[in-house]
């Protein structure tokens, strides 16, 4: 039940980090190893604008808990963006998070399990007669899209359209020139705004988008621009991470030793597998904060108003926090992985993501125990994300 990932790691500490290079895009564990061999606050100048990277578990965890110094309100990507929706700081963040908190409580999430099981079975029915099918396109992507649309209260009649918008949103977040994705994002914004106007006209708050559309702060509705941004954030966050969590975990179980067969024989606890997958293959390799003041980290000064990447992928492999960090181990104790962040901005959808993965993996091993990879598929594009955009499999 263990896999020691050593591909390309030898002497990695002696090389400069290249987040956009083909080697590190193909295997971000190389990035993690390089960062952990560098200074604790690493200045990365291969991107415009340049930024700092924190990689040690202690530093990343501490920064995530210090919401006054490392602020959220300029976007979670390397570019500076206006504070809107959930990507804002107190007190506005408290207001926006409060609007959606109820729908993501443990009980509300647990109540979704029967519906999730129904969706998964429908998706698996759809590939039953196929010799080769794509696990990403036909299972791990549509499931979270359908359920987050149902939570928001918007139609699910065009999955391909949502896929295009989600891809544009995450690419925009990581791009040096975000204007490249303006047309797709404008189309998504127009669609969401139409849904918001329909919700306000109906005047009922039976779904999450209605709650958001009808909410008032200091007696005023949120602006259309902010509501569109807010709803878009929930839509993208509600599917992108879960999609890669499912795909990454199946990919590892099918490629490491006899893990898939052990999993199908109920010799592996699904929650152990999910937690280790999140540590070993975080769907988000990191997110950005912005410094509100000068910060000194081990003799390096990070200036005020500077972007800082919290590198979850490296922190999750810090040997000071995890024994045998480059080994895929299904039974772990000690530190908690940082893939969902911690503190004020901890991922609000983390329990939903884990439930979706649990339901999917449980159904998949029962329906298709002979599942195997056709090939390694393709990596998702943006450097900040880690998963498979294509993962062809067969169960025959």
Image (cartoon, rainbow, N blue to C red):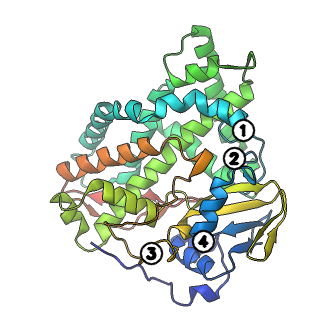
Residue matched to label 1: 90
Q: Residue, x 42% and y 43% (percent of image)?
A: 351
Is there any visible trace of residue 255 in the rendered image? yes
Q: Is the Cβ of the residue at disc 3 closer than 8 Å to that at disc 4?
A: no
Q: Which tag, 3 or 2, sits closer to the chain's start?
A: 2
Q: Which tag, 1 or 4, sits closer to the chain's start?
A: 4
- The label on residue 215 is none
Q: Is the Cβ of the residue at disc 1 closer than 8 Å to that at disc 3?
A: no
Q: Could you tell me how far apart the alpha carbons at marks 4 and 2 are, in whole angstroms?
A: 33 Å
Secondary structure type for disc 4: loop
Residue matched to label 3: 325
Label 1 Cα neighbours within 10 Å, binned few <14 / some 14-19 / many ≥20: some
Residue matched to label 4: 56
Q: Could you tell me how far apart the alpha carbons at marks 3 and 4 are, in whole angstroms?
A: 13 Å
Is there any visible trace of residue 392 in the rendered image? no
Q: Which tag, 3 or 4, sits closer to the chain's start?
A: 4
Indicate whether 131 appears above or below 99.
below
């Amino acid at each position: 039940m263990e896999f020691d990932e050593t591909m390309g790691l030898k002497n990695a500490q002696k090389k400069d980090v290249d987040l956009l290079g083909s080697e590190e895009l193909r295997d971000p564990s190389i990035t993690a190893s390089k960062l952990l061999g560098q200074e604790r606050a690493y200045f990365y100048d291969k991107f415009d604008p340049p930024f700092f990277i924190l990689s040690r578990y202690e530093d990343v965890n501490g920064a995530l808990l210090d919401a006054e110094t490392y602020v959220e309100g300029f976007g979670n990507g390397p570019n500076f963006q206006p504070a809107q929706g959930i990507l804002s700081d107190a007190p506005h963040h408290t207001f926006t998070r409060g609007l959606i908190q109820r729908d993501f409580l443990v009980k509300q999430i647990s109540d979704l399990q029967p519906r999730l099981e129904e969706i998964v079975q429908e998706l698996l029915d759809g590939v039953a007669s196929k010799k080769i099918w794509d696990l990403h396109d036909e299972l791990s992507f549509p499931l979270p899209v359908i359920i987050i649309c149902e939570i928001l209260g918007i139609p699910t009649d065009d999955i391909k359209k949502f896929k295009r918008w989600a891809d544009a949103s995450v690419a925009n977040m990581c791009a040096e020139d975000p204007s490249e994705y303006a047309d797709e994002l404008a189309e998504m914004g127009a669609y969401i705004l139409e849904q918001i106007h329909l919700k306000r006209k109906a005047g009922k708050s039976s779904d999450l988008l209605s709650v958001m559309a009808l909410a008032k702060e200091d007696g005023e509705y949120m602006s259309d621009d902010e509501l569109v941004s807010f709803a878009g954030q929930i839509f993208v966050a509600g599917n992108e991470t879960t999609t890669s969590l499912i795909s990454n975990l199946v990919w590892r179980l099918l490629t490491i030793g006899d893990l898939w067969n052990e999993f199908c024989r109920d010799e592996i606890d699904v929650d152990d597998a999910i937690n280790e997958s999140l540590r070993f293959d975080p769907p988000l390799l990191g997110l950005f904060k912005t410094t509100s003041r000068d910060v000194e980290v081990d003799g390096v000064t990070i200036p005020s108003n500077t972007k800082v990447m919290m590198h979850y992928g490296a922190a999750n492999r810090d040997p000071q926090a995890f024994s045998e960090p480059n080994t895929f181990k299904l039974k772990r104790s000690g530190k908690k992985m940082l893939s969902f962040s911690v503190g004020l901005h901890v991922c609000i959808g983390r329990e939903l993501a884990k439930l979706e993965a649990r339901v999917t993996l449980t159904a998949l091993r029962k329906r298709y125990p002979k599942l195997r990879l056709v090939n390694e598929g393709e990596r998702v594009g943006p450097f900040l994300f880690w998963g498979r955009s294509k993962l062809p499999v067969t169960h025959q």
